[in-house]
Image (cartoon, rainbow, N blue to C red):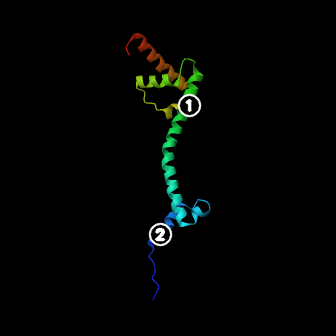
Amino acid sequence: MTRIRRGYIARRRRTKIRLFASSFRGAHSRLTRTITQQKIRALISSHRDRGRQKRTFRRLWITRINAVIREIGVSYSYSILIHGLYKKQVLLNRKILAQIAISNKECLYMISNEIIKEVDWKESTGII
């Protein structure tokens, strides 16, 4: 009986998986079974950590904004600033505010003063 040659589809699939795992160490980049297991693990981790990365960056931005705001004046805080931004309907997100806080503290100081002044004035006159 003659030998049957297998098709190229399985080999192509394994090659594609091997290309994904080429940077892994040891058997994780050489053996097909462990490559598939590690690929599943890597994809699960990357999916999980995308959400985690968003959370950590948001925490970092909030920390930076709060640090600069508290450095500027004693009566200010992050929550008062964000509340004032929402009341005045200013479209500056936390990422942009953090960049302003790092690059130009005086600009953030002017923004926060205007917002706090506006909110305080409206609350004292009873408009809000």
Q: Give the number of callouts.
A: 2
Under tag 2, what secondary structure? Answer: helix
Question: Which of the pair 70/1 is nearer the observer?
Answer: 1
- Residue labelled with disc 1: 63
- Residue labelled with disc 2: 12
Q: What residue is at 47 percent from the left and 16 percent from the top?
A: 117
* Position of residue 59 measured from the top left corner of the image (x, y, whole percent): 53, 34
- Relative to 41, does residue 59 appear above or below in the rendering? above
Q: What residue is at 56 percent from the left and 66 percent from the top?
A: 31
Near mark 2 (Cα within 10 A), the count class, few <14, some 14-19 or many ≥20, is few
Residue ranking furthest to the left: 127
* Position of residue 43 measured from the top left corner of the image (x, y, whole percent): 49, 54
* Position of residue 106 measured from the top left corner of the image (x, y, whole percent): 56, 24
Q: What residue is at 60 percent from the left and 23 percent from the top?
A: 71
Under tag 1, what secondary structure? Answer: helix
- Relative to 80, does residue 93 appear above or below in the rendering? below
Near mark 1 (Cα within 10 A), the count class, few <14, some 14-19 or many ≥20, is some
* Image quadrant where residue 7 sits: bottom left
- Relative to 93, does residue 28 appear above or below in the rendering? below
Q: Earlier in the sequence, mark 1 or mark 2?
A: 2
Q: Amino acid at mark 1?
A: Thr
Residue 105 visible to the viewer: no
Task: Name the quarter where the N terminus is drawn.
Answer: bottom left
* Position of residue 49 measured from the top left corner of the image (x, y, whole percent): 51, 46
Residue 21 visible to the viewer: yes
Task: Name the quarter where the C terminus is drawn.
Answer: top left
Cβ–Cβ below 8 Å for labels 1 and 2? no
36 on left or right of 26: left
- Relative to 37, does residue 82 appear above or below in the rendering? above
Residue ranking furthest to the right: 26
Q: CA distance from mark 1 to mark 2?
A: 49 Å
* Image quadrant where residue 67 sits: top right
